[in-house]
Image (tube, rainbow, N blue to C red):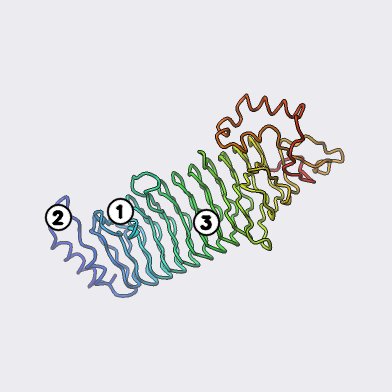
Amino acid sequence: MGAPLLLFAFALLLSQPLFADDLLPLQPLLDAANKGDEVKPPAGRYRGPVYITQAITLNGENGVIIDAEGKGSVISLESDGAVLRNLHLVNSGDSHNDIDSGIQVRGNFNVIKDNRIENTLFGIDVGESKSNIIRRNRISSKPYELGLRGDSIRLWYSFNNKVIDNVITDSRDMVAWYSGDNEFSGNVVSGGRYSLHFMYSKYNLVENNHFSKNSVGIFLMYSDGIVVRNNYIASAAGATGVGIGFKETSGITVEQNQVLHCASGLYIDVSPFDPDLPNVIRDNLIAFNGIGIRFLNDWQGNTFTANHFKGNIAQVVVSGAGSAGRHLWQGNFWDDYEGFDNNRDGVGDTPYELFAYADRVWMDIGGAQFFMGSPILEVIDFLERLAPFSDPLLLLRDQSPLIQANK
């Protein structure tokens, strides 16, 4: 920011009565800036909402708080090439229809980084915008019930954006609608509903995120060609808790993730939807879940290789009377494998086979799931394995199970 603009800013501030409850004006300072200027206001609490319509840098490193006083979005960014950083944004409105947010982005090639966004309905809303960078922001929503909060970061018809290294607590969802070729990496999300939710959004990258204590980790709905790699997903508990979910989704790569302590580690429903685009699930640790993988139906087209199944109450479950035998299972580690490795090649001498015995009771009757893992069902299951009343159902066969875990 040039000297004349800086002098104008100080004169403007000095002309205002500075009582304790007063908010300083910021919009005149932004309107007076020229394209390419850096606006660095003195420390203070400023009145929002504010509007940015040209490529300037708004830097709040001096200690700038912008307070929308419960009206609209704190900042509306309607420009290309702007930078918003080091700001503390608070008190948006509470309209879901208007998507009241900390920052509403309607432009391209903007950088939004190192901001603190609190008590705003939505955090950062990106609509019909591309090639923006959203990095190292700390975001939390209003203290409403979970379903009434806004989304922490929301992409709508937006492409080639990077959402990187943000810390999100107590918001609703991080979500992409009709948005492709975006990157979500290094984010930490807790206390929400969906850590990350895709709807009709293709070819996104999800990598190196830490998602814990949310209702759902990652859910992929009608969203093909996504890569989910090296994420930590834990403690998606409750009746609907899911680590990674698939709904009519094809061509997905899920690899090198840790999915731990969830009600269901993976939840798969009519996926892959396109039979020519199989889903590849490989080299993941799926451990200490109620159910390792839950198939909602008897389907086919997924490939499971080099995964590690450890400490799950049930490794694989298929709803209804179906099996998981039409998927490819090869070279996975199963901690309940009962075979040997006489030639010491690291692969079991006999296939790993998983059967459904009495546990079909809780698979097929929803209310009975409450008793999953209880002593009575464990006794019934043991007795039927010992002396089956009828032929058990083969759920899956892994022809080359690993003998030792490397995870």
Judge whether 134 appears above or below 327 on screen.
Answer: below
Left or right: 203 as drawn, with respect to 63: right
Q: Which numbered disc, 3 or 1, marks the residue closer to the eye? A: 1
Viewer-nearest residue: 265 or 86: 265
Q: Which numbered disc, 2 or 1, marks the residue closer to the eye? A: 1
Measured Cα–Cα span from mark 3 to mark 1: 29 Å
Measured Cα–Cα span from mark 2 to mark 3: 43 Å
Spot the residue most to the bottom.
Answer: 35
Q: Amino acid at mark 1?
A: Asp
Residue 94, numbered circle: 1
Residue beneath the point at 32% across and 64% down: 76
Measured Cα–Cα span from mark 2 to mark 1: 28 Å
Image coords of residue 313 (percent x, y): 63, 34
Among the 4 quarters of the image, the one containing residue 203: bottom right
Q: Which residue is mark 2?
A: 18
Q: Amino acid at mark 3?
A: Ser
Image coords of residue 356 (percent x, y): 70, 37
Image coords of residue 66 (percent x, y): 27, 57
Judge whether 180 appears above or below 286 on screen.
Answer: below
Image coords of residue 102 (percent x, y): 34, 57
Left or right: 282 as drawn, with respect to 386: left
Which quadrant of the figure contains the C terminus?
top right
Q: Secondary structure at mark 2?
A: loop
Among the 4 quarters of the image, the one containing residue 153: bottom left
Residue density around tag 2, few if under 14, some if 14–19, many if 20 or more, within 10 Å: few
First along the sequence among labels 2 and 1? 2
Among the 4 quarters of the image, the one containing residue 85: bottom left
Q: Secondary structure at mark 3?
A: strand
Q: Check whether the beta carbons of the residues at disc 2 and disc 3 lie within 8 A of each other.
A: no
Residue 185, numbered circle: 3
